[in-house]
Amino acid sequence: MSTLLKESIKLTASGRTDSGVHANKMVAHFDIKFDSKLDNNFTYKLNQFLPEDISINSIKRVKDGAHARFDAISRTYEYFISLKKTPFGNDFHYSFEKTLDLNLMKEATKVLLKYDDFECFSKTKTDVKTFKCKISYAEWTLLRNGYKFKITANRFLRNMVRAIVGTLLDIGIKKKTVDDLSKIIENKSIDQKNTTSEPLEIDKSYQPIKNENKVDSEHKTNIENKISLNNFEELLTFLIENREALLHAQLVNNVVIDSFESGKISMKISENCTFDVIKHLSKFLQDKTGLKWVIEEVQKTNNKTHEENKDINFEKKKKEIESDPIINEVKQLFPNAEIKDIE
């Protein structure tokens, strides 16, 4: 926006979401001195700058002083449960193949409307000043191949919706009772809650969930194997071993590594890069190593891409080889011969 409008723009969103949440409708605001450039074509131009997983629907003028976050009346999340394996939409639903008692889950959902303190469903390390949330709507809906849980409140705590869904699923498989839910909320007993893995949606948004047992198993395996990537070459080898050819190709050809240490990477990304390298690489490394890596983009660096360095090293070795007396004799016998590769 700053590029298109040619002035510094600060964007303020209506709120933050947990990792893995897909926003169907996220509101944000910005202040601008002069709005004549915000014509009907501006939204189109702006979308050309954005990656494929972000889309601007519309830009409208609002009253002075309007604030996307503080003027928001409510937020709505939708959580999708798939009851059988499917190759479609795995980023937008939680695969759960156990038999669920929908009536019990609906009964338990009504309990949520009786309370306003949900400390039990919040992350333990959080900087919020209050755990008060007013839930105005919560309901389960039967779908063709599963269920949808929809919940609306004036605000949500970090990880709150996932924790609620996990507890309601426990009730659905009769691992917990409806009375247990009341006790959990009243006793603020964090250790009694169950949290689903990854997926959600804000304001009619969809979020993905992974099989929790699978994630835990992979995490334990990674710790046992002590996966450690200490340099860029080790990362490239690790990508090939895990069949991440597309990500490997982008890193080799369109990324310049400014600095690399275990857990942190700084890089400059070429305009020729075809997808969000930082997003895909962060997810890959967290899934495979069990650690959260800090990956940041820099605008300038004196380094070169892996492929450019490879070419430079090849030319250097080529000159060394060509100075060898035996190679010189071969070239005299075969003047058109060239060194194509070095092993």
Image: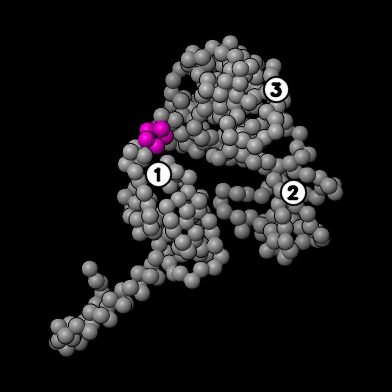
Foreground of the two, 27 or 175: 175
User: In the rendered structure, are the residues bearing label 2 and label 1 in contact, judged by CB atoms less than 8 Å apart?
Assistant: no
Quadrant where the N terminus is found in the figure: bottom right
The disc labelled 2 sits on which kind of residue?
Answer: His
Name the amino acid type tagged 3.
Answer: Asp
Residue at x 70%, y 22% (from the top left corner) = 116
Residue at the spot x=57%, y=31% of the render?
124
Q: Inspect the image, locate mark 1, and give the three-letter code of the amino acid beneath it.
A: Thr
Provide residue 51's location: percent of width, then percent of height: 57, 54
The span picked out in magenta is 214-220
Image coords of residue 139 (percent x, y)? 63, 21
Residue 127 showing in the rendered view: yes
**What label does residue 289 carry, if any?**
1
Classify 10 Å Cα crowding around label 1: few (below 14), some (14-19), many (20 and above).
many
Q: Between disc 2 and disc 1, whose residue precedes? A: 2
Q: Can you tell which of label 3 and label 2 is closer to the viewer?
A: 3
Q: Distance between the residues labelled 3 and 1?
A: 38 Å
